[in-house]
Image (cartoon, rainbow, N blue to C red):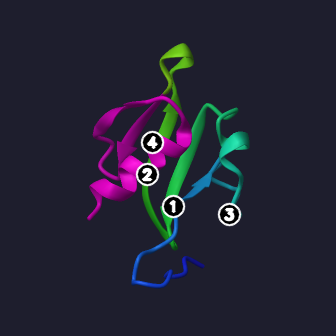
Amino acid sequence: MHQQKKGGRAGPPKVIADKAQRSNISAARADQQSWCAVYAGQACIGHTIRRGRHGFEAFDVDDKSIGVFADVAAAANALERGRR
């Protein structure tokens, strides 16, 4: 479950490497996956796709690309910022 930190700020988004998998995985393992869903609590806020040497492309829940990022953690953080 997504818990609030002191000061009312939520923790980092959870990255899921496979639709069937529903547990938190490390960003290092997510970097090895070609597709990752990104969750804030129980709500899916988007997904990422590996674009080879270019990095990871992030898509919001409407499948609109929000950019290409160096790693999956940066892409997940951009999705989190975009939903506010």
Q: CA distance from mark 1 to mark 4?
A: 10 Å
Q: Which amino acid lies under the numbered mark 1 shown in the image of this protein?
A: Pro
* Dot 2 or dot 3, earlier in sequence: 3
Location of residue 27 in the rendering, given as x and y in whole percent from the top left corner: 65, 46
Near mark 4 (Cα within 10 A), the count class, few <14, some 14-19 or many ≥20, is many
For the record, the magenta segment spans 56-84
Q: Which mark is residue 75?
A: 4
Residue type indicated by callout 2: Asn
Residue 22's disc is: 3
Amino acid of disc 3: Arg
Q: Are marks 2 and 3 in contact (CB under 8 Å)?
A: no
**Foreground pick, 62 / 57:** 57
Circles 1 and 3: CB atoms closer than 8 Å: no
SS at badge 2: helix
Q: Secondary structure at mark 1?
A: loop
Q: Which mark is residue 13?
A: 1
